[in-house]
Image (spheres, grey):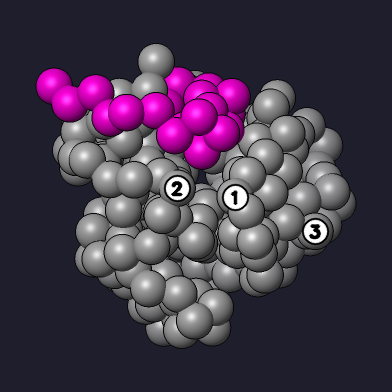
Amino acid sequence: MIRFHRQFEPRSIQLLIFDLDGTLIDSRLDLVHSVNATLRHLGRPELPDELIASYVGDGAPALIRRTLGPDADNESLVRQGLEYFLTYYREHKLDYTRVYEGVQQALTAIRDSQNGRPRQMAVLSNKPVNPSRAIVEALGLGKFFVNVYGGNSFSTKKPDPEGAQTILRETGSRAEETLLVGDSAVDIATGRNAGTWTCGVTYGFAPHTLAEAEPDVVVDTPQELEELFARAPRPQLP
């Protein structure tokens, strides 16, 4: 069910900025396997899948620090773990990763559901940019996006607005005509910091965090995201 918490007109949106993991793609297993491979390499016990998934969203360095628990301040260990993780993930990033069902259809419909020029779309992830772009291309999503940026594309990561503001400038878009879509509080805070509208998706990795930064609208499936633009329903405010 589409749930509005702040009223806006979906038909006015000209640019959409998407998170990647947990929003467009289900990369949970490959991330979990890469983290546990790293822990084994470091002589550490593996962690449960759900716990690792809850650590995703703030970039690879933060992910490794969280998995190291009380040793998160050991910079040498963090560097060693991060190097191994990135090497392992580079080779295994597409073992199980897939596009969420309905995402391709939703992107097509959103892009083409207004008269005149198609809507522009971009990806802003905290995952490093090279695997982000490689995954987007390998899964057939590249055609939808004017650009794909990662957590090392800028001097800051989400929730800092630098990446979103760069996309706004590059596309000549206004913040009030932009929707940032993601599955976590980090994404919603990014949109707020950049002055855009925000959409939370509950099918991703961190829907529980959306309560920390309430999105303007929440959807439960990619199909509902498509419906938001196809039908432009009257907002149902609480």
Q: Residue furthest front?
A: 115
- Specify whether residue 225 is painted magenta: yes
Q: Is residue 167 magenta?
A: no
The residue labelled by disc 2 is 11
Q: Residue at x 28, y 45 (%)?
A: 8
Image check: 147 left or right of 190?
right
To which residue does mark 1 refer? 114
Say which mark, if any, is on residue 143: 3
Mark 1 residue type: Gln
Tell me if residue 145 can be seen: yes
Inter-mark Cα distance, 2 to 3: 22 Å
Circle 1 — which element?
loop
Q: Position of residue 180 (x, y in %)?
A: 41, 53
For label 1, the crowd category at 10 Å Cα-Cα, with few meaning under 14, some 14 to 19 and many 20 or more, is some
Q: Residue at x 70, y 24 (%)?
A: 101
* Magenta span of residues: 219-238
Against 112, is 104 above or below?
above
Pointers 1 and 2 in contact (CB under 8 A)? yes
